[in-house]
Amino acid sequence: MILVLFVAAVTLAVYRLVRRRLTTGAASGVAVGALGLQLFGLWVMAELTFANMG
């Protein structure tokens, strides 16, 4: 649950930071990109964790 809140907080922070400099559409795109990178990072961590269990 804490990871979900952290991912949401970082995504919102990226959106708000970029929104100040760019348009809403561009900020949304950057926020979705940041969310994708975070989810990819979580997936890699999960894969490495499960690989070390065997």
Image (tube, rainbow, N blue to C red):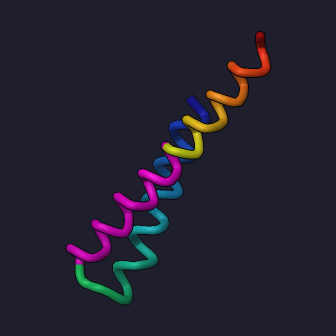
- Residue 22 lies, in percent from the top left, at 31, 86
In the displayed structure, does residue 33 sit left or right of residue 41? Answer: left
Q: Which residues are magenta?
A: 24-39
Asked whether residue 30 is drawn in magenta, I would say yes
- Residue 41 lies, in percent from the top left, at 58, 45
- Residue 18 lies, in percent from the top left, at 40, 79
Dominant secondary structure of the magenta stretch?
Answer: helix
Where the C terminus falls, by quadrant?
top right
**Which residue is painted at 46% across and 68% down in the image?**
14
Position of 48 relative to 40 (above/below) = above
**Which residue is painted at 24% across and 83% down in the image?**
23
The residue at the far left in this view is 25
Where the N terminus falls, by quadrant?
top right
In the displayed structure, does residue 17 sit left or right of residue 27? Answer: right
**Which residue is painted at 61% across and 34% down in the image?**
2
Position of 23 relative to 14 (above/below) = below
